[in-house]
Amino acid sequence: MELAELTVVDPRNGNTVSRVPIADASACEDAVARARAASTDWARTPPAERAAAVRAAAGAVQAAAAELAGLNERETGKLKDDALGGVAAGIDTLVQYAELGPLHRGRSLQGVWGATDLMVPGPRGVVAVLTPWNDPIAVAAGLLGAALVSGNTVVHKPSERCPATGRRFAELLSAQLPDGVLEIVDGDAAVGSRLAAAEQVDVVAHVGSTAAGQQITRACAVRGAKALLENGGNDALIVDAGVDPRWAASQAALGAFANAGQICVSVERVYVVESGSQAFLQALADEARRWADRIGPLVDERQRAHVHRHVDDAVRRGARLLVGGQPRPGRGSFYPPTVLTDCASDMLVFAEETFGPVAPVRVVPDFETALAEAADDRYGLAATVLTPDMAHAQTAWRSLPVGTVKINAVFGGAPGGAAQPRRLSGNGFGFGPELLDEMTTTKVVHWTSPGR
C-alpha cells in the first residue's frame, strides 16, 4: 500500500512545490527505536566532540544557505531576504550551542569533610522536536542544537507546511552525526501525536499552536515525559499618551505586518490612549498602505481563510475598517495589510491569535486601562509598550504577565535572552543557555569512603 503524501503548493502562485510521504505508525516507531539505540553512545561522547559535530553541521548549512532559503520561499511564501535571514539565524544558533554545550556544568556542594557532593547534569534521552513553518530553520536550529550538544538523541518532525525545507535542513545536520542520533520523520498532526505519545520519548519540544501544545501536554503527563512548549500568542502593543504618533505607527506596522504578521511575537492587538488616538490611527493607515507591496503571501489558503474570518467577525460586530480587509484577487494566498478600529475585547481579532497582517486597534481613556486590558488575556508570550513616561514603563514591565516585555521597540534584544512563556503560550525556556537546562536532568551524587 502506498503511503499518503503531503502536498505543498507555492502560496505565491498555487504551483506544486513538494510532495512528501507521510510516515506511518511503523516508521515513527522505528525512528524512535533507532534514536533510543543510539542514545547511550551519544550520551557518553565527550561534550567537545558533540559540539564539534554541531559546528560542522553549521558549516554544512552555510554551504547550502541559498538552497534552503529557496525551498523556504517556495513552500511558505517568505520573502527572499527574510528566508536568507532565517538561515543565517539558524547558523548562528548552531554555532552558539556548539560553544555553550561543553561549558554547561553542574555544581559542587559543601558537605562533610570526608565526602564529595555534586549536582551533575546529564541528557534526558530521546527528544521529539516538532517545529513550525513560519521560521523553520531558525527555530529548529535552536531546539536541535541544544538537544544534540547536551547528549540527547532526537526524532525531528518538521512542519507539514514546509516539509522539504525542514527535511533538507535536518539532513544536513544528520550527515555530521552518528547513525540514529538525529532521525527525521515527515507528516501531519497525526505523526506529531504519535511521537508525543511514544513511550521511549523523554522530552517533546514543540513550537506551534496552543491546541497542539495542549494535546502534547496531556500525552506527556500520562507517562511522565517532559513537555517544552512555545505556543500561541496574542501580543499586545500599548501606545501611551505623549509618543510621536508617526513613530508609534511605524512600530505598530512593523510588529503587525512583518512576514505578513506570521511571527510568533507579532503584534496582535493595539491599545492607544485616546488623547493621541486620531493622529496615530491616521498614521497607521498610511503605514499600512506603504506596506502593501512589502509583504509576501500568507502560508496557504487555510491561513488566509482564518485571517479573513477574524476580520469579517470584527466588521460585522461594529469595528471600522480603515485599510485592507479583503483578500487580494488572483493566484496566491495574499492578504493586504489591514487596520481596524473601534474594536472590542471579545472580537476574534482581540481574543484569539490572528497570525496575519492585521492591526486591530482599541482606543482607551488612559494608560492604566490599556495596561489592565492588555494583561487580561489567556496568553502570555510577549508585549510591547511605547511610552515616554519612565514610571509607566517600570509599571508595565513589572506587571504584564508575559514572558517578554519590550519598551519602545517591537523587536530586538540582547543575544542569549531566554524567557518563559505563560498561560496558553507554553512553558519552559526555549532559547539561550537556559535551553540547555531544559534539555538535561540533574543527578545529585554523594560520594564518601567505605566504612571499616
Image (cartoon, rainbow, N blue to C red):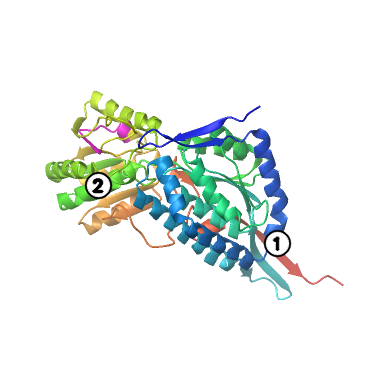
Q: In the image, residue 221 lies at what x, y percent? A: 61, 39
Tell me, yes or no, whether the highlighted magenta stretch contains residue 86: no
Which image quarter holds the C terminus? bottom right
Magenta stretch, residue numbers: 337-350
Residue 6 x, y percent position in the rendering = 52, 33
* Callout 2 amino acid: Ala
Q: Earlier in the sequence, mark 1 or mark 2?
A: 1
Q: Is residue 91 above or below residue 129?
A: below
Most foreground residue, 327 or 240:
327
Residue 291's x, y, as percent? 23, 44
Q: Mark 1 points at which residue?
A: 44
Within 10 Å of disc 1 (Cα), the crowding (few <14, some 14-19, many 20+) is: few
Residue 265 is situated, as x and y percent measured from the top left of the image, at 37, 47
The quadrant holding residue 16 is top left
Quadrant of the image occupied by residue 109: bottom right
Residue visible at 21% across and 42% down? Answer: 288
332 relative to 112 in the view: left or right? left
Q: Name the residue under label 2.
A: 252
